[in-house]
Image (cartoon, rainbow, N blue to C red):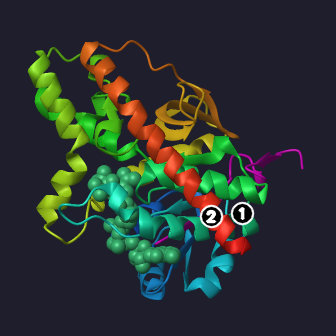
């Protein structure tokens, strides 16, 4: 036991730790490319692919790739618990995507119930797992997950994440385009939440520094905030961002796995239970460690435009959080009847 440490509620050998990771919604537009990228991770020993249908083919296909990670498919509610057994991390891209003209909140009625059911299963089977939620509206689905876990007595606020990495990835890409730089040399915090005005890129803190007149800064901020809609419109009814989202989720999952395995100084933005603002959930840069979020990095100074966006975003985000909490309360009352 000398080189064995307790990680995320499971005993894994330090150094050679390989996690078991479940993807819920694995046969979908995000789920498939995400599973492909995770199959390539040297930090994952086993991938558990769950969906309501069609996972056998996806799992068979991926299992022919010559990387060490094992892949197994699980289909239908009857196999959900088996899919989750022994997992240290669960990534959730299950649910319906937007069509043109819809907001992310329009997905609430369907996706809220899906996320609630999946989180109940996580609470029952792998209660210590890190949970990464992609399903929209993230501003509400993360509070829903938190409420489900609280009721089950398995809530670990430092290990529940709304995946907002795509907002950061887009900000990096658009800034790099503007500067003619390599995106890997660009960094920029994106804070708040993951819908419209709640997506707040702090362009004044971008590195390399941006020298933009206010109208151009405003236009860049709007492009980052509306980038999801840009993809929804470009796909013209065939769904929303899948490939860029899969890439972003794989980047975030890999960051979590590196932190889980003991790497220091891992920082990413994520929508988490937070004490940085007056709201119970807020996206900000966080430092990740073995036990999850170990530090909230300060939001830092905002310029006038950012401060104005911040002030207007707070009530919207507060409403989305409360909507998630109310959903679980109502659901529980209905179940008690
Ligand atoms: N957080 C973010 O930045 C982003 C979030 N999204 C969201 O991700 C979600 C998924 O998007 P896509 O993959 O494009 O949709 P999709 O429709 O292509 O795939 C969703 C998958 O979820 C599965 N699913 C439905 N109900 C399920 C259940 N009860 N259990 C397990 N799986 C279930 C479906 O069978 C389908 O395979 C959407 O809600 C979308 O809005 C999309 C892009 C970015
Ligand atoms: O816009 C959508 O519906 C999907 C999403 O969250 C994004 O691409 O950021």
For residue 226, which quarter of the picture?
A: top left
Residue 20, x across and y down, in percent? 64, 64
Q: Is residue 260 above or below residue 297?
A: below
Residue 36, x across and y down, in percent? 41, 67
Q: Is residue 2 magenta?
A: yes
Do the residues under discs 2 and 1 have CB atoms within 8 angstroms? Answer: yes
For residue 307, which quarter of the picture?
A: top left
Mark 1 sits near ligand 1, with its Cβ under 8 Å away? no
The circle on residue 123 is: 1
Q: Residues within 10 Å of mark 2 (few under 14, many from 20)?
A: many
Helix, strand or loop at disc 1? helix
Can residue 197 be spotted in the picture?
A: yes
| Residue closer to the observer: 331 or 184 | 331
**Cα gap from disc 2 to disc 1, whole angstroms:** 6 Å
Q: Is residue 206 above or below residue 68?
A: above
Q: Which residues are magenta?
A: 1-25
Q: Is residue 194 above or below residue 11?
A: above
Query: In percent of the image, x 41 and y 68: which residue is there?
Result: 31
Query: In percent of the image, x 62 and y 66: which residue is there?
Result: 331
Mark 2 sits near ligand 1, with its Cβ under 8 Å away? no
In the visual, does 85 lie left or right of 42? Answer: right
Residue on which the image places disc 2: 119
In the visual, does 126 lie left or right of 312? Answer: right
For residue 73, which quarter of the picture?
A: bottom right
Q: Residues within 10 Å of mark 1 (few under 14, many from 20)?
A: many
Query: In percent of the image, x 13 and y 67: which residue is there?
Result: 236
Q: Residue furthest front?
A: 337
Can residue 175 be spotted in the picture?
A: no
Q: Quadrant of the C terminus?
A: bottom right
């Amino acid at each position: 036991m000398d080189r064995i440490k307790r990680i995320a509620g499971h005993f894994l050998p330090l150094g050679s730790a390989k996690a078991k990771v479940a993807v819920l919604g694995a046969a979908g537009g995000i789920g498939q490319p995400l599973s492909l990228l995770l199959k390539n991770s040297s930090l994952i020993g086993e991938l558990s692919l769950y969906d309501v249908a069609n996972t056998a083919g996806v799992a068979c296909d991926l299992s022919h790739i010559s990387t060490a990670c094992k892949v197994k498919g699980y289909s239908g509610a009857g196999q959900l618990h088996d899919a989750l057994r022994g997992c240290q991390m669960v990534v959730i891209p299950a649910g319906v995507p937007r069509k043109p003209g819809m907001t992310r909140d329009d997905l609430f009625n369907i996706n809220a119930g899906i996320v609630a059911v999946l989180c109940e299963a996580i609470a029952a089977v792998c209660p210590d797992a890190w949970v990464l939620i992609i399903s929209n509206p993230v501003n509400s689905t993360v509070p829903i997950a938190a409420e489900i876990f609280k009721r089950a007595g398995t809530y670990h606020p430092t290990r529940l994440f709304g995946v907002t990495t795509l907002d950061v990835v887009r900000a990096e890409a658009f800034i790099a385009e503007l500067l003619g730089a390599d995106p890997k040399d660009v960094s920029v915090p994106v804070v708040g939440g993951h819908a419209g005005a709640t997506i707040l890129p702090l362009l004044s803190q971008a590195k390399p520094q941006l020298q933009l007149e206010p109208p151009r800064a405003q236009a860049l901020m709007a492009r980052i905030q509306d980038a999801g809609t840009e993809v929804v419109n470009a796909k013209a009814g065939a769904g929303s961002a899948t490939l860029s989202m899969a890439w972003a989720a794989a980047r975030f999952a890999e960051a979590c796995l590196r932190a889980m395995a003991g790497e220091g100084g891992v920082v990413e933005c994520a929508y988490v239970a937070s004490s940085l603002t007056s709201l119970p959930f807020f996206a900000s840069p966080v430092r990740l460690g073995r036990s999850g979020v170990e530090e909230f990095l300060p939001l830092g100074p905002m310029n006038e435009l950012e401060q104005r966006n911040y002030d207007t975003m707070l009530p919207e985000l507060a409403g989305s959080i409360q909507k998630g909490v109310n959903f679980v309360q109502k659901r529980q009352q209905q179940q008690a009847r």
